[in-house]
Image (tube, grey):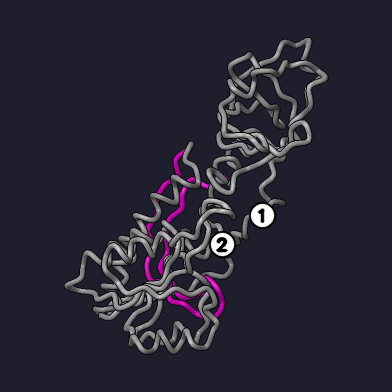
Amino acid sequence: MRIIFMGTPEFAVPSLRAIAELDNEFEIVLVVTGKDKPRRSRRSEPEPTPVKKAAKELGFTVFEIDDVKDPRFAGTVARYRPDVIVVAAFRILPPSVFEQARLGAFNLHASLLPHYRGAAPVNWAIINGDRETGVTTFFLRKRVDTGSIILQEKTNIGVEETAGELAGRLSVIGAGAVVTTLKLIREGKAEPLPQDEAKMTKAPKLTTENTRIDWAEPVDAICDFVRGLSPRPTAWTVFNHKKVKIYKAIPSDFQLPESKQQAMVPGSFSTDGNRLFVMGLDGWVEIISLQMEGKRKMNAVEFCCGFRCEEECPLFS
């Protein structure tokens, strides 16, 4: 079976490696990924994608492209005569590209479709407090994330698991699903099922606007929000007119003396010198790690140095 693999980030690498391990069953004739670009910062040197690094290590031919709608790209894909195109965290392909696969093109998606269609399924599952998620393989069609489902694998979400940790686990689970899907297609046993549109939910792109913490939310919702955006793009708030990224936060049973409680509103903070607490709608959130604008990542003890918890202290907002 001749396969073209398309992917970019670390999430796609386990799938590429899993297919490569079965070289007696599947032949990866081409790996398609994004072009080299600065990845650590805007000023850093251009770096290859994680998929390109793995593909070169494995000895595969690599084709780099950013504009998948370029008509010449479809011609390149056609010249490799793929039986199947496997897509894992890549760009939205036009039909002129994915229809080149003789037996079909399928995508690995990090949710249990039709839940969380879109760019950030792992993040939104945690933000919304879900306790279960999974991966889905589905045949590509023109409308994004709407194709018929081939296979799904479920997994529980840990109560303290971050988006980065969950994405890492799902990438491994997804690799197994990709291999199983390829075998089903090869053996003619794939029985794709249409998605139930009535159950569809969205996972929109994460932006500066929708990643800001609302301290007027319940404590559990705030902590889920932080977990769901850690380590990237990171939940943020404002303190003393500066942006602060919050990497880890947990619910707390912290209690203030009654004499001080009336002055507290959501976003108010308190510290015992070693720990940092911020008030939510129904209690306190303990901040474990954070990063002030223009400074390095720090723990609560480092942040508390130099601050006194007085009524005149600015709020997190």
Alpha-carbon span between mark 1 and mark 2:
11 Å
Which residue sits at x=70%, y=27%? 279
- Judging by the rendered image, the residue that carries numbered circle 2 is 119
Residue 142 on the magenta span: yes
Identify the residue at image location x=66%, y=48%.
211
Which x, y percent locates residue 20? 25, 67
Q: Could you tell me which residue is drawn at 46 percent across and 64 percent down?
A: 89
Q: Amino acid at mark 2?
A: Ala
As helix, strand or loop, the secondary structure at mark 2 comes to loop
User: In this rendering, does residue 266 appear at all?
Assistant: no
- Asked if one can make out residue 16 in the rendered structure from this viewpoint, the answer is yes
Residues shaded magenta:
129-158
Q: From the top left corner, tell me how far across and down residue 191 is, in percent.
A: 35, 76
Q: Which mark is residue 207?
A: 1
The disc label shown at residue 146, or none: none
**Residue 272 image point, x, y percent:** 63, 14
